[in-house]
Amino acid sequence: SAYAASKAGLLGLTRTWALELGRDGITVNAIAPGPIATPLFTAANPPDAPRTRAIIDAVPVGRMGTAEDVAEGVGFFLSDGAGFITGQTLAVCGGITVGKGTV
């Protein structure tokens, strides 16, 4: 699908740019969010809908993610603590992708 192809392309760019820009002191990483409770998601998936409950039940931590959860991952990559981390993809997904292959 177009979604899968674009996602793979972005992950490839992340790794390629990490290799190309590392010598310049630039780290490049990606965030791969899982199910995040955004206004758009909530409009399409009301909290009491069976589909929403099924999504939450599939997340090992038992809840939807928030924009703040994603921001924490971004904040980590921007911190001095991540200075030796490059070319990586952080799944902010509550564990839903664990055991399902690469992000």
Image (tube, rainbow, N blue to C red):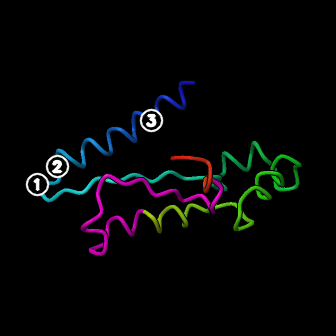
Q: CA distance from mark 1 to mark 2?
A: 5 Å
Residue in front for this viewpoint, 1 or 67: 1
Residue type, numbered disc 1:
Asp
Indicate the quadrant containing the N terminus: top left, top right, bottom left or bottom right: top right
**Which residue is labeled 3 in the image?**
8
Tally the numbered discs. 3
Q: On the rendered structure, is 30 left or right of 86?
A: right
Q: Residue at label 2?
A: 21
Question: Where's residue 43, x and y in %?
Answer: 74, 46
Residue 91, image x, y percentages: 51, 56
For mark 2, give the secondary structure: helix
Q: Is residue 99 left or right of residue 81?
A: right
Q: Residue at x 47, y 64 (%)?
A: 71
Please, what is the three-letter code of the amino acid marked with disc 3?
Ala
Q: Give me the residue at 30% from left, 63% from top.
A: 85
Report if the CB atoms under discs 2 and 3 are less than 8 Å apart: no
* Up/down of 8 relative to 88, above or below: above
The secondary structure type at the circle numbered 1 is helix
Q: Amino acid at mark 2?
A: Leu
Q: Position of residue 97 (x, y in %)?
A: 61, 53
Q: Which residues are magenta?
A: 74-96
List the residue tagged with mark 1.
24
Name the residue at the bottom extreme: 81
Query: Considering only order in the chain, which callout, 3 or 2, is on the residue closer to the N terminus?
Result: 3
Q: Residues within 10 Å of mark 1 (few under 14, many from 20)?
A: few
